[in-house]
Amino acid sequence: MNVIHGEVARLRATGVPLWSTLIALACGGGLTLLLALTGPQNAQPPMPDIDTPEGVGFVLGIGTVLLFVPALIGTVAITSEYRHRTIGTTFLVVPRRGRVLTAKLTVYTVLGIVYGTIVSLSALLALIVATWMRGVPLGVDPADLTPALIQLSLAAAAYMLLGVGIGALARSPLVAIGIVLGYFMFAEYILMLIPGINAIYPFLPGGATASLTSFDFLTDAIASQTALAPATVASPVLGASVLVAYAAAAAILAVIAPLRRDLT
């Protein structure tokens, strides 16, 4: 617990919780409010408006595209310790690296859940505000959105751990950020364009997220612009299982990789 308290104090001193909160509000409430005010019917391809369940699902689901942001937060937070050499001081104070890294994973998991919760609640509030500003009813009862908002929160925690794992392996901030952005913004979408290869899409992080949230707008949009069949989206249970597996693998790598590695 002392190691966990020390990690929380370090994050607070570096401003990570504050910046994470501001980013979560922008990615959740800001993006949702913008989409709800402009109207999903103006998207390409057009979607139903927010006075329908489909339109509400689209506005909330598009937020999953920005789930690489918590991965970036985790990556930057863990690599900054190697960049500024503060990780050495940490290991000197607490010589058991496994204990230190496990504490870090615990704190980052909680931070990811808090980030996802802020995104979810601010997105719901933005939807309610948008319906009031536009004078249209919300297509679903806000209480019925609880499962989708919980799924988004848990997905954010999984992505946070993915970022931590990538950062622990790469150690260089530029390399780790390049990997996260390169994969989540380009590589997955390129794989969706390769005939036959897009069959593995449900087992990739983005595909697992789409399966978990039942958000297949991106796959349908890519298919509508090409001659390819849309990438398949699996069941929410499989999507959750794949994301948990990725998060567990990232956590294990984040603990094992630095155990015997020279800090210099």
Image: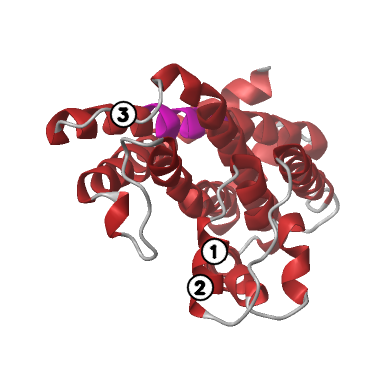
Magenta span contains residue 118: yes
Q: Nearer the viewer, residue 9 or 184?
A: 184
Coloring basis for residues: secondary structure
Task: Identify the secondary structure beneath mark 1.
Answer: helix
Q: Can you give x and y, in whole percent of width and height, for residue 137 in the image?
A: 26, 28
Q: Residues within 10 Å of mark 1 (few under 14, many from 20)?
A: some
Please state if 78 lies on the left or on the right of 59 as rendered.
right
Q: Is residue 264 visible?
A: no
Label pair 3/1, CB-CB below 8 angstroms? no
Q: Residues within 10 Å of mark 2 (few under 14, many from 20)?
A: some
Q: Can you give x and y, in whole percent of width and height, for residue 203 in the image?
A: 76, 56
| Residue type beneath disc 1 | Asp
Give me the C-alpha separation between circle 3 and circle 2.
Answer: 28 Å
Magenta span contains residue 249: no
Q: Can you give x and y, in whole percent of width and height, for residue 50 in the image?
A: 32, 39
Q: Earlier in the sequence, mark 3 or mark 1?
A: 3
Q: Quadrant of residue 18?
A: top left
| Residue type beneath disc 2 | Ser
Q: Name the residue carrying label 1.
A: 220
Q: Quadrant of residue 44?
A: bottom left
Q: Earlier in the sequence, mark 3 or mark 2?
A: 3
The span shown in magenta is: 113-121
| Residue type beneath disc 3 | Leu
Q: Nearer the viewer, residue 74 or 53?
A: 53
